[in-house]
Image: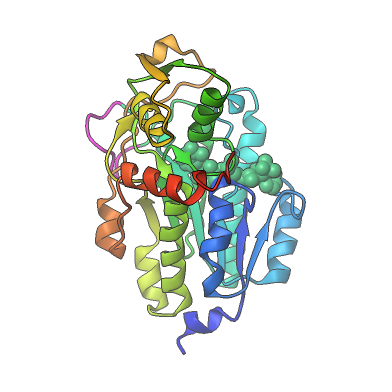
Amino acid sequence: MSEAGKEMLRPILVTGARGQVGSELTRALQGLGPTVAVDRARLDLADHDSVRTFVRELKPAIIVNAAAYTAVDQAESDAATARLINADLPRVLAEEAGDLDALLIHYSTDYVFDGRLDRPYIETDTPDPLNVYGQTKLEGERAVAAVGGKHLIFRTSWVYGATGRNFLLTMLRLAREGRTELSIVDDQIGAPTWSATIAALSAHGAALYATGAHDDAWWTQRSGLYHLTSGGETSWAGFARAIFKAAGRDDVTVKPIASHEYRTAARRPLNSRLSGTKLAQSFGLSAPSWEVALSSCFELHMRSGESQ
Ligand SMILES: NC(=O)c1ccc[n+]([C@@H]2O[C@H](COP(=O)([O-])OP(=O)(O)OC[C@H]3O[C@@H](n4cnc5c(N)ncnc54)[C@H](OP(=O)(O)O)[C@@H]3O)[C@@H](O)[C@H]2O)c1
């Protein structure tokens, strides 16, 4: 057995266990070995001393950090908390992972970019966040890279799923409440990404590590940033239309509006498109199109009423 394979006698730690991605990860990682998934009640991630103690006692072989401060508008007036979770916590986890020679899988966001480019962003494009959330997530990415251990940082976008706070569930709730016309932003372009897609591709990365198929040099070489989103692109209005179609709610009309007609505390990039080329070339991984993923999400969850 290779060194990395032996590591899998140690558990996988998942933070943010009740979040959109974290809850899918706890399922997706199950086959790889013992998984310890922590929610806020079990471990307050703002208490970094407790986090260090917890990690040192658990000695995980892989840490998957799916926790984040994701309230984008609230972050504008609560930068300190956002920074604690989005920037400082990843540094703490990267340092602890380094001491344990563990792999750290971490997530970031399209909101690190200002959205002014007229093509999908690649990993080497210069970030320039428009809001506090994006700024703190960028600081988190840079902190993990600066620590320098084995790590994968997946930048994703427009996450939705059957649980949690997300655009899909908000649209379905508004339709259930009897709204028949909704004004939705049409000038922000990106790829809605199903939490299960993110978990499945992350689990593939974790499995590569767990099986010990590659040595430390391979992992060091591949450590870094990867864009992980659904294929294709749409606007929020386009996404809303597809949701109502999938839900059989043709009675709901989507009225396209511009971002400036929908005021929010945080500014958002107009171009949120992320190119998945590096992930495909480095790991042979690519996500399904956003339409296929949405349809799968409906098949799996919505018909059974899991999210109602
Ligand atoms: N959501 C999106 O559209 C989006 C877009 C791009 C990138 N991302 C990134 O993708 C990753 C996963 O996002 P997500 O949508 O799954 O997020 P999410 O659903 O908001 O889940 C985040 C989790 O972090 C937990 N958390 C926050 N502060 C904590 C603390 N002090 N102690 C313990 N737990 C804490 C939350 O717990 P509570 O439930 O108790 O608050 C929540 O369960 C994040 O890195 C995020 O930045 C998300």
Displayed-image quarter of ligand 1: top right
**Which residue is painted at 62% across and 49% down in the image?**
89
Residue 77 falls inside the magenta stretch: no
Left or right of 276, for residue 216 = right
- Residue 4: horizontal and vertical position, in percent? 48, 79
**Which residue is painted at 33% across and 37% down in the image?**
126
**Which residue is painted at 37% across and 50% down in the image?**
228
Vertical position of residue 8 compared to residue 177: above or below: below
Classified by dominant secondary structure, the portion drawn in magenta counts as loop
**Which residue is painted at 37% across and 32% down in the image?**
245
Vertical position of residue 268 compared to residue 125: above or below: above
- Residue 32: horizontal and vertical position, in percent? 52, 74
**The quadrant where residue 56 appears:** bottom right
Left or right of 128, for residue 308 = right
Q: Nearer the viewer, residue 100 or 271?
A: 271
Q: Nearer the viewer, residue 64 or 257?
A: 257
- Residue 44: horizontal and vertical position, in percent? 74, 49
- Residue 25: horizontal and vertical position, in percent? 54, 58
Magenta range is: 116-126
Vertical position of residue 166 compared to residue 141: above or below: above
Instruction: Check the picture and name the quadrant holding the C terminus.
Output: top right
**The quadrant where residue 75 appears:** top right
Residue 278 in sight in this render:
yes
The colour mode here is: rainbow
